[in-house]
């Protein structure tokens, strides 16, 4: 009986781990980052008004508004990053590496860094 109970507990733990692992999957406009198969993507990071960054990802998808390209969790909340490099490191886990960086005009007197990532 103890053996069966131990097996049941082990199985329940494994099932719970798999169920919770996708609980907060990252996505862009409903497409999971793990499902994106583009060879290149661009990342732009913006201050959230505090000390964190919101990142927008463009891999060639159709978007209606700029905010549709924000990286979000399954609840639709924007993911917050400590810095643009924090986001780049996160995307490395999805098979991308930094390829190029350039600056893009953002308004009359402002510019923003754009990070181009390439699939490994």
Image (cartoon, rainbow, N blue to C red):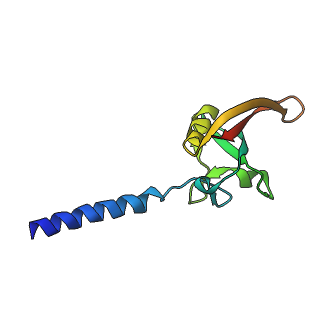
Extreme residue in the left direction: 1
**Where, by quadrant of the figure, is residue 96 drawn?**
top right
**Camera-side residue: 6 or 28?**
6
Q: Is residue 16 visible?
A: yes
On screen, 88 above or below 30?
above
On screen, 73 above or below 11?
above
Count the marks: how many? Answer: 0
Q: Is residue 52 visible?
A: no
111 lies left or right of 94: right
Horizontal and vertical percent position of residue 42: 74, 42
24 lies left or right of 66: left
37 lies left or right of 9: right
Horizontal and vertical percent position of residue 56: 70, 45
**Where, by quadrant of the figure, is residue 5 drawn?**
bottom left
Residue at image coords 20%, 65%: 7
- The image quadrant where one finds the C terminus is top right
- The image quadrant where one finds the N terminus is bottom left
Horizontal and vertical percent position of residue 100: 74, 31
Residue at image coords 76%, 55%: 61
Extreme residue in the right direction: 108
On screen, 84 above or below 74?
above
Residue at image coords 68%, 58%: 29
Horizontal and vertical percent position of residue 86: 58, 35
Residue at image coords 68%, 50%: 70
């Amino acid at each position: 009986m103890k053996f069966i109970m131990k097996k049941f507990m082990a199985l329940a733990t494994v099932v719970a781990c798999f169920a919770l692992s996708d609980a907060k999957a990252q996505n862009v406009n409903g497409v999971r980052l793990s499902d994106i198969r583009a060879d290149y993507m661009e990342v732009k990071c913006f201050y959230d008004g505090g000390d964190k960054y919101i990142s927008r990802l463009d891999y060639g998808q159709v978007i209606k508004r700029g905010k549709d390209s924000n990286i979000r969790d399954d609840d639709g909340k924007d993911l917050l990053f400590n810095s643009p490099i924090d986001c780049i490191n996160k995307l490395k886990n999805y098979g991308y590496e930094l390829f190029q960086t350039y600056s893009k005009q953002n308004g009359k007197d402002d510019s923003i860094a754009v990070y181009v990532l390439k699939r490994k």
